[in-house]
Image (spheres, rainbow, N blue to C red):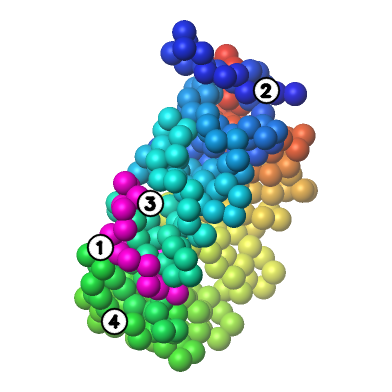
Amino acid sequence: MVQFIEPSPLEQSPVMPEPLLFDTAADFAEGTAAVRQGDRLGYIDHSGSLVVTVADANVSVAGPFSEKLALARAGDYHGYIDTTGNWAIAVQFRQAKAFSEGLAAVQGGNTYGFVNTQGQWVIEPQFELAESFSEGLAVVKQEGLYGYLNPAGEWAIPIQFRDAWRFSEARAVVKVDSQYGYLAPDGTIAIPLTFDGAFTFSDGLARVRQGDKWGFINPAGEWMIPAQFDYAADFSENRAVVQQQGQGGYVDSTGTGVIAGEFSYAADFSEGLAAIQVDGRYGYINLAGDVVIPPTFQNAGPFSEGFARVQVNNQWGFIDTQGQFLTESDAR
């Protein structure tokens, strides 16, 4: 069984033994990826070196680093660890989100507020729900309705919506009664509430539903690809997964089919590659639709920082864009 090697004070780059396979693994973020072997948690870097060991043995889950802090859970409560593996913000919150724009939404008692990277309350807990800041605003719920705060805790857009999502590309999905539309950052309705379903903007387009069909609009609310699909995913790298009359594949931003539907499952593109499933196994295609990493894995995640996590023999490892596994020999 693969074991963690404890960092040695005499070594600059402690490494994991070969092969680099783990019970669980997360995507790379800020140069590291969280991995677990047995009851041990740590983080490896791009070379496979173990660079962070989670110090508290009570930690059961540790997330990716965001703004140099990683959300972690011990027992029923959450806190944040730093890049030494120690608690930077003590475990104390019933629920918590990753840091974004210098603040994190956390549940103190029965309500949510926001803390800074020192763990100090910047916006006191008072909300029924709260999401991370995005583009300078955070969506929160109070008295059963949603609105948006600025980082000072002031209402930028007062509570008034039945549902609301984070801002992305200067637009946020909101719901009034049973219809969805989009807000601008100044709180005005940028795209009228005329849709039966809506998702955030990505690559300049948003997928929306009218009746039981999906299409794509631009930030002005104009149809770029008319509602015609039985299913549609978000755009990423000028490709979106769609399904129509039982056939799936990828379209580009003009709605032109660019990759035929030959797969049981197809994921969003990331770093020029997308995970696909064929005959129960996962591999990767490029933007032209060519299979560049054969489908041999039990499961597969997106590429991030040049690596993707893949499952083999019920364990997880990392491959590069050529399909080569990260091994001990890669470590510095």
Q: Are marks 2 and 4 in contact (CB under 8 Å)?
A: no
Residue 99 is tagged as 3
Q: Tell me which numbered mark, 4 or 3, is placed earlier along the sequence.
A: 3
Q: Which residues are magenta?
A: 116-134
In the image: residue 3, left or right of residue 139: right
- In the rendered image, which quarter is residue 222 located in? bottom left
Residue 263, image x and y in percent? 68, 53
Q: Which residue is mark 2?
A: 3
The kind of residue tagged 4 is Pro
Q: CA distance from mark 4 to mark 1?
A: 14 Å
Q: Tell me which numbered mark, 2 or 4, is placed earlier along the sequence.
A: 2
Residue 38, image x and y in percent? 70, 33
Q: Are marks 2 and 3 in contact (CB under 8 Å)?
A: no
Residue drawn at (43%, 52%), measured in percent from left and top? 98
Residue drawn at (60%, 40%), measured in percent from left and top? 58
**Crowding at mark 4 (Cα within 10 Å: few <14, some 14-19, many 20+):** some
Instruction: Provide the secondary structure element on which disc 3 rests.
Output: loop
Q: Which residue is mark 1?
A: 151
Vertical arrangement, residue 92 with respect to residue 66, above or below: below
**Crowding at mark 1 (Cα within 10 Å: few <14, some 14-19, many 20+):** some
Q: Is residue 125 at all visible to an observer of this figure?
A: yes
Residue 158 is tagged as 4
- In the rendered image, which quarter is residue 246 located in? bottom right
The kind of residue tagged 3 is Phe
**Crowding at mark 3 (Cα within 10 Å: few <14, some 14-19, many 20+):** many
Q: CA distance from mark 1 to mark 3?
A: 13 Å
Residue 13 part of the magenta segment:
no
